[in-house]
Image: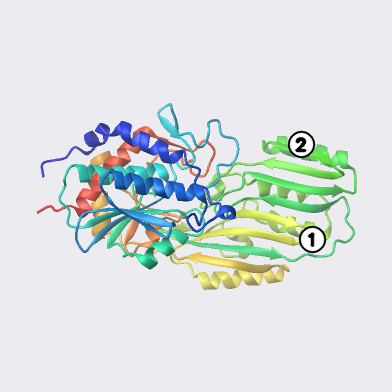
Amino acid sequence: MADIHWMEEVLKRKEDLIRDLKGILQIRSVLDEANATEEAPLGQGVREALQYMLDLGEKDGFKTKNVQNLAGHLEMGEGEDILGILGHVDVVPEGDGWTVDPYSGTVKDGKIYARGSSDDKGPTMAAYYGMKIVKELGVPLEKRVRLIVGTDEESNWRCMDAYFANEEMPTIGFSPDADFPIIYAEKGIADFDIIQDPEKTEDPQQAELLSFESGRRYNMVPDYAEARLVAHGEQTELLQKFQDYQKETGLAGQDFVDGGVLILKLEGVSAHGAEPENGKSAGLYLAKFLNSVALDRAGAKFIKTLNQFFGRSRGEYFGIGYKDEVSGELTINIGIMSYHQEKGGRIGLNMRYPVTFDLEAGKTKIVSKLKKDGLRFDHFSDQKPHYVDKNDPLITTLAKVYEEQTGEEAKLLAIGGGTYARTLKKGVAFGALFPGREDVMHQKDEYMYVEDLLKATAIYAQSIYELAGKHA
C-alpha cells in the first residue's frame, strides 16, 4: 500500500473518538460483587462497560464475542496467528476530592477528566480506534487482530482466567495499560495478609483502640483513615496533640467525640501500589501518630506493626530487600488496614518483586518474621514475573513504530505494575502514558491529554499494520 499518514487518519476521526471515549467514561464500572448476578458477575456497571465495547465493535463491523460476561473480544482479519491487544474497562473506586464529576468525561485545558481516562478506558479506546482505522483503510492482514476486553484487572483477573480457559492464546500481543515506550519486564505481584488474632484487653493506659480502618484495595495507597478510641487519660490533650500532628504533616483531618468515643480521621494522598512512595498513606500516617499514644496491649501491637512500615516500602520489615538489573527493586504497599477489638487485625500487603527474586525463600522469611512477632501469614496469591527478550521482533517492531511516530528513542522499561501482557506467552505493555507526563492513575482528577490520546491512536494503528499486515 502507499504510505499511510497515520496521524492524519486519526485526526479525521477525532470527534468520533472523543465521543465514544466519553460514552464509556460515563459508566461507573467499579467492582460491585454485592449486587452481582449471573449476567453481571462483577456488578452491573462493569457489565455495562463490557457491553458498550462489544456493541461499538458490532456497529463498526468487527466480529464480537462475550465470554461469560467477564471478558470479550472484537476481531478482524484472517489467519492462524493472532495479534492480541489486551485492555480493560473496569476502574478503581473514584475516592474523594475530585474537582470535576469523576464520571463525566469533562474536557478542559486539553485534558479529558474521568476515572479510567488513563487507566485504562482511554488507552483501550485508542487501541480500538487503531484497529478501526486499519479496517476502514482496507489494509490486507495476514493475522487475526483481536482487541481483548477485560473487566477485573483492578482486582483478581477473573476475566483473563475465564477468557483464556475458553479462547485461543494470541501468538503475540501488547497491552495499552502502562507507559510508553515499551515495557519488556514486569515484576511479580503477590498479595497477602498479616493477621493479628484477637487478644484480651488489659490495663489500657491513655486510650483504648476500638477500631482502625484504612484502604480499599491491596494495590492502592490509602487516602483515608479512621480510628475510634476510648480515652482513659486527658482527652483534650490527645485532641490537641492530633491537631498539632496534622499541621506538622500538612495532612487534613478531623477529630471529635461521639457518644464517648473519640474519632480521629486523616486524609492522605492516594497512588498506585506499585510505588508507594508516590503517595502519602493516610493509614500509616495515622498509625505513626497513634504510636505515640499509650494504648491497650492489643491496639498497641497492631499500631506498632503498621508503624514498622512507615517510610519503609522496600521489604525492610521482613528482611527481604532485593533488586536486579532487569526490573529494579522489590516494593511493598500496605493497601488495607483493619482492626476491631473483638475480631483482631488484618493488614493487606501488595508486594512487587523483581524477575530474579526467589519468592519461596522470601515467603519463608516473611512467615518466620510474623511468627516471631506473634502474627500470622494468610490469603497469599501470586502473579509470576513476565519478561520478553529485548531483541525479539515484537519489541524491535514496536520500537520502530514508536520512534517514527514520536521522533524519540524507544527505551525499554521494567515496571512494578502488572498488566495483561503477563497473561500472554509473548506480550509487552505498550503505552499509553508518554515520558514526562504525570502518572495520575488511581488518583483524584485522573485525566489523559487529548493530544496523547490521538498520538497513541496513531501509534497503535501503525503497530497493528506492521505486526499483522501483509507487506509483500
Mark in front: 1 vs 2: 1
Q: Is residue 454 visible?
A: yes
SS at mark 1?
loop
| Residue positioned most to the front | 38
Query: Of residues 386 and 211, which is closer to you in this image?
Result: 211
Q: Amino acid at mark 1?
A: Glu
Query: Is residue 29 placed above or below 9 in the rendered structure?
Result: below
Task: Estimate the x, y position of residue 331 in percent, counting from the top left.
Answer: 53, 57
Q: Position of residue 399 (x, y in %)?
A: 26, 50
Crowding near pointer 2: few (<14 within 10 Å), some, many (20+)? few
Q: Is residue 2 left or right of residue 330?
A: left
* Res. 25 image quadrant: top left
Q: Are marks 1 and 2 in contact (CB under 8 Å)?
A: no
Return the x and y of residue 222 as percentages of the image width and height.
Answer: 61, 47
- Residue 23 position in % (x across, y down): 41, 38
Mark 1 and mark 2: span between their CA atoms?
31 Å
Quarter of the N terminus within the rendering: top left
Q: Residue at x 65, y 44 (%)?
A: 224
Q: Determine which residue is flagged by label 1.
A: 342
The colour scheme used to paint the residues is rainbow
Report whether 311 appears left or right of 140. Answer: right
Q: Nearer the viewer, residue 114 or 289?
A: 114
Q: Is residue 100 left or right of residue 117?
A: right
For the C terminus, the quadrant is bottom left
Q: Which mark is residue 244?
A: 2
Residue 361 vertical placement versus 215 (above, below): below
Whether residue 91 is visible to the viewer of this picture, yes or no, is: no
Amino acid type of the residue tagged 2 in the rendering: Asp
Determine the residue located farthest toward the top in the rendered image: 109
